[in-house]
Structures are given as structure tokens and as C-alpha cells.
Amino acid sequence: MSETEQPTSSDNNYYATQKSTFQKMQSEVRLLSITDENKELLKKFYAYMEILTSSYTTSDGMITKRFGLLGRMAELIPVHLFDNEELKKVFPTAVTDGSVVLFNVDLFKKQLEVEKEYAAHKDQKHLEVMPVIMHEILHCMFEHTKRNLLNAPMVNESMSYYTLADEYAVNVNVVNILKDFNYEPGPELKKLTAGELSLEEKQMGIEQFTMGLSEEDVKKFLGKSEYEIMNALLEQAKRNQEKMQQNGKNKKGSAQQQSGGGQQSGSGQQGNSPYPRKGGVRRNS
């Protein structure tokens, strides 16, 4: 897709549609049913929020937020669990419109069980719940719901490279912040944020936008603007496309030699576009 082409309407309207959904939801929908189980879950959920918003006293007597500005933003932005069935169909994990964060109670319960397993194996390093809350609040901090780049090249039918850059910008900060406290996103969370990626998307390196960022990725993108990250991703996609094309030519040449110059039915490539058109890149937000 050239830069002059219009992206699909789904990406242009994503945030507007999401904001409309939130406005309707907040005025008309009960987020969380009142049950004994949910009351206990709320206590556990807000224990995480207390950690995120906590303060400490420095050696010179100053009181400061443990997680800096992120902790202050966590105090200002409402964060809620929800179990509304209609909302769960639309938002299977967690989501934000820039002014409020919603966390699917099914995901929360699953992550609590996973963290219990980590604890049972004396794993004090991996986290599941906190990185997701951080992820959504950082989207609010960076005002991603208010900004979008029109005419950005598309990753697939529902996501532009600029939107993908938003995810990188958030996740490199999540990974970097957790590293300062000797934590990192857990293996199950890395699987969750990868979604159902197609083979082509994996070949293009798209899975790197997940919580499974390498130390090299963090160094490369930390402190970069979304526009700079987008351009870096486009360059990476171009290099991967050229490599895939060269591999396809090599395979075709080898097959022709083995068959005495006969026609090969395919090169193992899915089209000539450097931007994957199909797949299930799933966003947390």
C-alpha cells in the first residue's frame, strides 16, 4: 500500500467507535454484578492498584511515587473490573478510551491462577496482572486515543503501522519499568498479547510488539516517538519482505533444477505486499 492510499475505515474509526461504546456503556450498563465472588475479586484487584499508586520516603525525607508519573496517573484514571456479557464479547482482555480503564474479570481470574502457579514454584520474577494495568494507563498517558495518523500503511485489514507503533511505545515502557524492579511480564501474558498471528505476520516480525520484547527491542524503541517507531517498523518490514522474496526465488530455482526446469506451483510466499493483509493481531486496548 502506498502512502497516498487511504487505510481501511476500521482503523480510522477505531477510536471513535470505541469512545462511543464507552460513553454508552458508562451511562447505561452495569459493569460488574454484585456477588460475593466479585466482592473478593475487587479486593484483590484494588490491592494491585494500591501497589501501583503507592509512595515511599526517600533518604532525604521526600515522599515520591514508587512508579513515578505512572503511579500518579493510576490515581487519576478510574480502573474497573467488568463482567457484563455484552462487553466481554467486544473486549476480551482490557481496554481504555483514554479516560477510564476496564479489565475483563475472566482475564483477571485466569491471571490470578497463573500467578499462584508462579508463587508455588517460588517464581518471584514474573507478573501477569500488573503489566496489563500499566499498559492501559500508559495508553492514557500518551493520549493514544486522541491521536491517530491517517494514511498510515496497514499491517493488516484492521491495524495500521501507526497503531502498531502505539503498542510498541507502551510495551517498551512496561518492560523497562518492570525491569527496574527486577520483574518482567510472565510467559502466559506474552502468549496472550501475541494473539493469533498468521505465519506471514510472524515472518514480518510483528509478534515483537507483544509483552515479549527483547532487551534489544527495548533499547531500540525506548524514548522514541510513535512516528519514529512506525518508520523503523516499516524499514524492518521492507527488509523482511526483500529477504522473503529472495528466499522464494532461491526455492523456485532449486525446484526447477530438480525437476529439469519444470514449472513450480508456488514460491512459498503469500502475495507481494510488504504489509500483511490478514491475521489476528489482537490489541489489549
Image (spheres, rainbow, N blue to C red):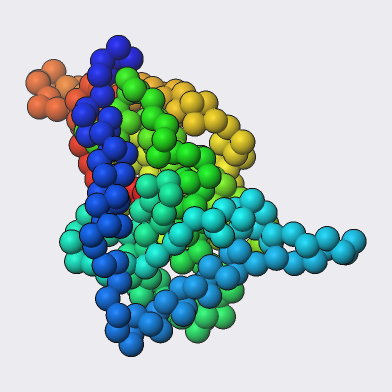
Rendered position, 177 above or below 121 = above
Question: Quick one: 237 or 73, which is closer to the camera?
Answer: 73
The percent position of residue 154, horizontal first and vertical second, equals 29, 28
When asked about the image quadrant of residue 10, the answer is top left
Residue drawn at (41%, 35%) of the image: 146
When asked about the image quadrant of residue 274, the answer is top left
Asked whether the viewer can see residue 240, the reply is no
The percent position of residue 158, horizontal first and vertical second, equals 24, 36
Rendered position, 4 above or below 156 = above
Count the labels in the image: 0
Question: Quick one: 77 or 264, which is closer to the camera?
Answer: 77
| Viewport quadrant of the N terminus | top left
The percent position of residue 189, horizontal first and vertical second, equals 41, 61
Horizontal side of 203 relative to 272 (left or right) equals: right
Question: Quick one: 256 or 207, which is closer to the camera?
Answer: 207
Question: Quick one: 21 or 213, which is closer to the camera?
Answer: 21
The percent position of residue 29, horizontal first and vertical second, equals 24, 62
Residue drawn at (24%, 52%) of the image: 24
Farthest residue, direction right: 60
Farthest residue, direction front: 27
Horizontal side of 75 relative to 234 (left or right) equals: right
Asked whether the viewer can see residue 283, the reply is yes
Horizontal side of 80 relative to 119 (left or right) equals: left
